[in-house]
Image (cartoon, grey):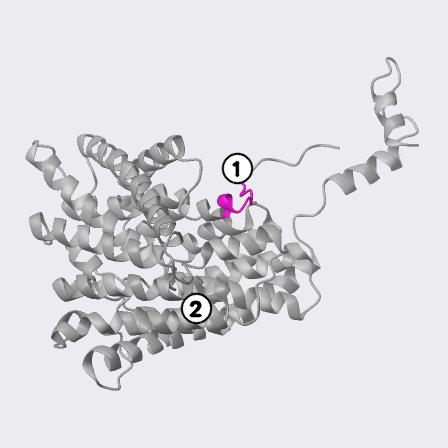
């Protein structure tokens, strides 16, 4: 009996559906409601655990490499600690350091892999959507190497974006070496990315949500369980590779009052406008580079010149800048000095990223958003609104990332995980949802998807159940 007969029988008055249809109904139920997980899922989970161990080790090696290049380029010493270029004594010569690094990155992109340009996540999204999650093998070593050179020579990026991209490339490489489906390869790619973010930041829950919101485009146990396993494996290994100290030193914050929540909502709306401006500025600068009458291989060196000039005037804008985030979260970096730093960091990062060098977006967005959050907090304090500047900085960080990427839940959980303080949850939800609201209304795309939209690639923005047959 066909499905049409089943439908006819089910709508015929007086005919019990169970008459003569028991086996067929049972079969249809099994086919339409498969198991959430099966033995194959356990295999993928085991692969994700092994992948996470490799990605965590690669993350540690990448940080060592960035530290080595930074120490050689700015201090003329051989050391692997992650040093800040802020205290260099190169004088005017500091301008040349980012230029030289950018020239090397341009050559690697021209003769190695063009996909190393940018922050990596849009490129991973594109491979998922258009190429069955197949990332070229050379990306697994060219991306981290180019990022280490870019950041180590003063590029205003964080290490987390490149390691997320590298973890995804390793997951894709594994999925191309063994017999798996395209969907399973996508899960391996996302699991590698989540493991990389967890290894750097110690934020497994946020890493899982980021992978779901930006990479797998679905919410199924077959997808999110292996990603969770990968994040937990990376988190288990992290103390041996990175120690137990938190990435950021966040002061203890009290619970927010109802009046303060309204202030954080207002802050979130302002940060939403900022995130739109940041996204449009980055692609406006990228369009300007497209018009230059020189080969794109040389664009990063032009961006490096801007980074170097700004770095000479304000050395704290160079490099990873996690110490800047610490200062902003402390609530003691305020006023005109913070405003000038925020503006210079934005110009340096947006020009460098728009030039097509290899770098990331997470740490710069956190830095700019946190600084802007403190400045807004100071304005609100002047209006006699009770506001904690450290909380305002944290909300600004998360809201800027939520508005720019629309990874709403990942942004909220990331900020809460780095603090380990449940009292931050309501302010974060309030600020991030407000920023998300502005971004979603004003922009059709995000800082992650604009490039793909320009290439004609549709990126899913909603999770909906599949159409019934």
Query: Toward the viewer: 260 or 433?
Result: 433
Residue 406: image location, x then y, percent: 41, 42
Residue 270 visible, this angle: yes
Q: Residue at x 32, y 37 (%)?
A: 435
Name the residue located 51 percent from the left edge and 71 percent from the top edge: 140
Disc number placed over residue 295 in the picture, else none: none
Q: Residues within 10 Å of mark 2 (few under 14, many from 20)?
A: some
Characterize the magenta stretch by its predominant secondary structure. loop
Q: Residue furthest bottom?
A: 78
User: Helix, strand or loop at disc 2?
Assistant: helix
- Under tag 1, what secondary structure? loop
Q: For this rendering, which residue is in front, 214 or 33?
A: 214
Q: Position of residue 207 (x, y in %)?
A: 43, 55
- Where residue 202 sits, quadrant-wise, is bottom left
Along the horizontal axis of the image, is 131 left or right of 49?
right
Q: Nearer the viewer, residue 436 or 404?
A: 404
Residue bearing mark 1:
462
**Point 89% across, 30% down: residue:** 21
Residue 245 in the magenta stretch? The answer is no
**Mark 1 or 2, which is nearer the eye?**
1
Residue drawn at the location 40% of the way across and 34% of the way down = 440
> In the rendered image of this protein, does residue 4 appear above or below residue 218?
above
Given residues 386 and 461, the one toward you in this image is 461
Q: CA distance from mark 1 to mark 2?
A: 32 Å
* First along the sequence among labels 1 and 2: 2
Q: Quadrant of the N terminus?
A: top right
Residue 36, position in %: x, y? Answer: 65, 48
Q: Which residue was labeled with disc 2?
A: 236
Q: Are marks 1 and 2 in contact (CB under 8 Å)?
A: no
Residue 361 in sight: no
The magenta-colored residue range is 452-460
């Amino acid at each position: 009996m066909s499905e049409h007969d089943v439908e006819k029988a089910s709508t015929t008055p007086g005919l019990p559906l169970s008459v003569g249809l028991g086996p067929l109904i049972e079969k249809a139920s099994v086919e339409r409601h498969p198991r959430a997980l099966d033995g194959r899922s356990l295999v993928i989970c085991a692969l994700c655990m092994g992948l996470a161990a490799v990605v965590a080790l690669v993350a540690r090696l990448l940080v060592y490499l960035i530290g080595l290049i930074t120490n050689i380029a700015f201090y003329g010493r051989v050391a692997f600690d992650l040093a800040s270029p802020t205290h260099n004594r190169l004088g005017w010569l500091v301008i040349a350091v980012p230029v030289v690094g950018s020239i090397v990155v341009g050559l690697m992109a021209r003769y190695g892999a063009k996909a190393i340009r940018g922050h990596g996540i849009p490129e991973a999204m594109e491979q998922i959507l258009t190429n069955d999650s197949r990332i070229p093998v050379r990306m697994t070593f060219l991306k981290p190497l180019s990022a280490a050179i870019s950041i180590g020579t003063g590029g205003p990026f964080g290490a987390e974006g490149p390691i997320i991209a590298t973890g995804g490339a390793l997951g894709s490489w594994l999925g191309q070496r063994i017999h798996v489906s395209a969907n399973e390869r996508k899960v391996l790619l996302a699991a590698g990315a989540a493991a990389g973010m967890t290894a750097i930041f110690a934020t497994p829950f946020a890493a899982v949500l980021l992978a779901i919101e930006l990479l797998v485009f679905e919410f199924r146990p077959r997808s999110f369980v292996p990603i969770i396993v990968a994040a937990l494996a990376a988190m288990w290994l992290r103390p041996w590779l990175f120690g137990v100290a938190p990435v950021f030193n966040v002061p203890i914050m009290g619970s927010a009052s109802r009046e303060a929540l309204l202030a954080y909502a207002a802050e979130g709306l302002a940060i939403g406008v900022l995130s739109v401006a940041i996204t449009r500025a980055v692609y406006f600068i990228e369009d300007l580079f497209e018009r230059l009458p020189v080969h794109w291989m040389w664009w990063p060196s032009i961006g490096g010149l801007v980074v170097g000039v700004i770095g000479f005037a304000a050395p704290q804008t160079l490099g990873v800048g996690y110490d800047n985030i610490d200062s902003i979260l402390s609530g003691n970096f305020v006023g005109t000095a913070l405003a000038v730093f925020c503006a210079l960091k934005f110009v340096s990062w947006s020009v460098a990223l728009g030039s097509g060098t290899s770098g990331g977006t997470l740490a710069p967005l956190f830095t700019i958003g946190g600084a802007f959050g403190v400045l807004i907090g100071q304005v609100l304090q002047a209006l006699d609104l009770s506001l904690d500047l450290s909380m305002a900085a944290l909300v600004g960080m998360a809201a800027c990332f939520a508005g720019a990427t629309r990874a709403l839940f990942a942004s909220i959980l990331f900020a809460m995980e780095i603090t380990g303080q449940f009292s931050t949850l309501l302010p974060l939800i309030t600020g991030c949802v407000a920023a998300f609201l502005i971004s979603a209304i004003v922009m059709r795309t995000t800082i992650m998807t604009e490039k793909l939209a320009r290439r004609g690639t549709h990126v899913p923005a909603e999770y909906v159940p599949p159409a019934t047959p």
